[in-house]
Image (cartoon, rainbow, N blue to C red):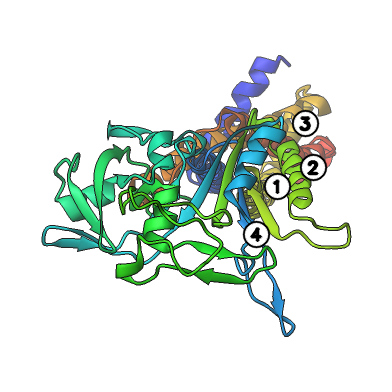
């Protein structure tokens, strides 16, 4: 018998009971749809993670002070003031794989006042001009501050879009003066919108200024020994500008303006941000920076680091691992659904063999071979799974689009998943359809004709 005749008879047999055929395919449809939906949502999540990492700056690293123990209690990160501006300069000078470096000073819970409006930004940073390149911050309008403005502790700042909306009512803030802790700042630029980061924090609720200005005029000059003893000077509004209280610091010349501050030699910074010459070299850059800082801080081989280095690759690996774990978990549930669907197809095919025993005996009596019977039932099973797979792919993609529109979850179509769905559909048809087809092909024609 010709193969085309066998295919025609298989399709005819399936269409003879359309309701049962559709119900048989339902398990495969649901399983494939679940696989496609999970794959598209999983890949969309991975893409969102990559974009969040890029917002942080691909190939960038963050150095934070370490911690110390007091009476056996870990005092937490930052309890040791170990990072100096000179550390940042040394890293740029002596680490070949480091391209750019920026000191960073954090100011928290500082109220911003403009006219009758006030706001407490989620983030207020003092940075160097290189920070904007390292973290891939784009300028919406205005300009970035210069290195000279860092050197002279200039009272200039850049604001995020959330600050523009909440403090300035959406109007352009360029050249406006805002007040932060009784110090006035001129707004020279607006940063482009970044949205929320991977932790859900608003990246646009930010004010950035020269790091020297933040340390000297806003947060106070933190000084102390490398072992963690610190003192914070100039905390009262009336003591923001003068340098006093530490005798070995140079006094200001009487001819200098009171706004010209003298940078103490041992002013500590909160963090150091750096970028590698190539994103793939970030791990090598970490090794170089670690060795340099240990040498500069006089740490022996038996002593722990008094700093911690984190890189964007750490977050990427962590988030990818979590995303992969969840995707695999959901994929496992979908595969179980596919197996259940395959068992359903095997069950229905076995029932079909029993119901069509006389038909099988009659075909064998008129010359059909066991191979033809095997081929017919195998084709029926494959067609059931293949059509179910196609419908499942369409349903799965539609479900992913629905999730995107209703819940704003990121999705990404996966041609590899579609191809895998076709292969899985055919494989299920062959695997779960072979036994019923083999059983039909082994029927005794005489016994089959007698079957009632």
Q: Position of residue 437 (x, y in %)?
A: 76, 37
Name the foreground residue: 31 vs 270. Answer: 270
Q: Which residue is mark 1?
A: 346
Q: Position of residue 66 (x, y in %)?
A: 67, 63
> How far is mark 3 from mark 4, CA to CA?
77 Å
Q: Which residue is mark 4?
A: 82
Name the foreground residue: 376 vs 94. Answer: 94
Q: Which residue is mark 3?
A: 374
Label 1 element class: helix
> How far is mark 4 from mark 1, CA to CA?
69 Å
Q: Does the residue at mark 1 contact the one at mark 2 (Cβ under 8 Å)?
A: yes
Q: Residue furthest front?
A: 254
Residue at 44% from the left image edge and 66% from the top image edge = 244
Q: Does the residue at mark 4 contact the one at mark 1 (Cβ under 8 Å)?
A: no
Q: Residues within 10 Å of mark 1 (few under 14, many from 20)?
A: many
Q: Earlier in the sequence, mark 3 or mark 2?
A: 3
Label 2 element class: helix
Label 4 element class: loop
Q: Earlier in the sequence, mark 1 or mark 2?
A: 1
Q: Position of residue 295 (x, y in %)?
A: 79, 49
């Amino acid at each position: 018998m010709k193969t085309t005749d066998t295919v025609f008879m298989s399709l005819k047999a399936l269409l003879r009971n359309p309701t049962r055929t559709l119900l048989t395919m339902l398990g495969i449809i649901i399983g494939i749809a679940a696989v496609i939906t999970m794959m598209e949502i999983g890949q969309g999540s991975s893409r969102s993670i990559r974009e969040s990492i890029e917002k942080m700056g691909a190939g960038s690293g963050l150095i934070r002070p370490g911690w110390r123990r007091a009476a056996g209690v870990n005092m937490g990160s930052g309890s040791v003031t170990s990072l100096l501006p000179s550390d940042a300069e040394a890293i740029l000078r002596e680490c070949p794989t480091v391209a750019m470096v920026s000191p960073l000073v954090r100011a928290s819970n500082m109220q911003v006042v403009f006219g009758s409006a006030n706001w407490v930004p989620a983030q207020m940073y003092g940075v160097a001009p290189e920070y904007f390149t390292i973290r891939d911050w784009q300028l919406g309008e205005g300009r970035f501050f210069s290195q000279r403005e860092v050197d002279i502790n200039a009272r200039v700042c850049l604001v995020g879009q959330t600050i523009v909306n909440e403090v300035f009512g959406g109007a352009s803030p360029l050249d406006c003066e805002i007040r932060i802790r009784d110090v006035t700042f001129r707004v020279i630029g607006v940063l482009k919108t970044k949205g929320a980061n991977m932790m859900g924090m608003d990246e646009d609720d930010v004010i950035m200024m020269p790091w020297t200005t933040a340390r000297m005029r806003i947060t106070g000059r933190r000084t102390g020994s490398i072992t963690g003893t610190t003192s914070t000077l100039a905390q009262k509004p009336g003591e923001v500008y003068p340098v006093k209280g530490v005798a070995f610091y140079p006094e200001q010349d009487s001819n200098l303006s009171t706004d010209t501050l003298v940078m103490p030699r041992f002013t500590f910074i909160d963090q150091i941000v750096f970028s590698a010459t190539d994103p793939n070299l970030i791990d090598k850059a970490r090794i170089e920076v670690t060795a340099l800082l240990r040498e500069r801080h006089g740490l022996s081989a038996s002593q722990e680091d008094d700093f911690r280095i984190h890189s964007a690759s750490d977050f990427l690996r962590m988030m990818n691992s979590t995303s992969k774990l969840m995707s695999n978990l959901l994929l496992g549930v979908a595969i179980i659904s596919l197996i259940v669907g395959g068992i359903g197809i095997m069950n229905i095919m076995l029932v079909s063999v029993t119901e069509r025993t006389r038909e099988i005996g009659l075909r064998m009596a008129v010359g059909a071979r066991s191979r033809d019977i095997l081929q017919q039932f195998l084709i029926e099973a494959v067609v059931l799974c293949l059509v179910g797979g196609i419908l499942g792919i369409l349903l799965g993609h539609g479900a992913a689009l629905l999730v995107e529109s209703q819940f704003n979850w990121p999705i990404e179509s996966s041609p590899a998943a579609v191809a895998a769905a076709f292969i899985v559909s055919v494989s299920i048809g062959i695997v779960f359809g072979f036994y019923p087809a083999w059983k039909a092909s082994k029927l005794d024609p005489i016994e089959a004709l007698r079957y009632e």
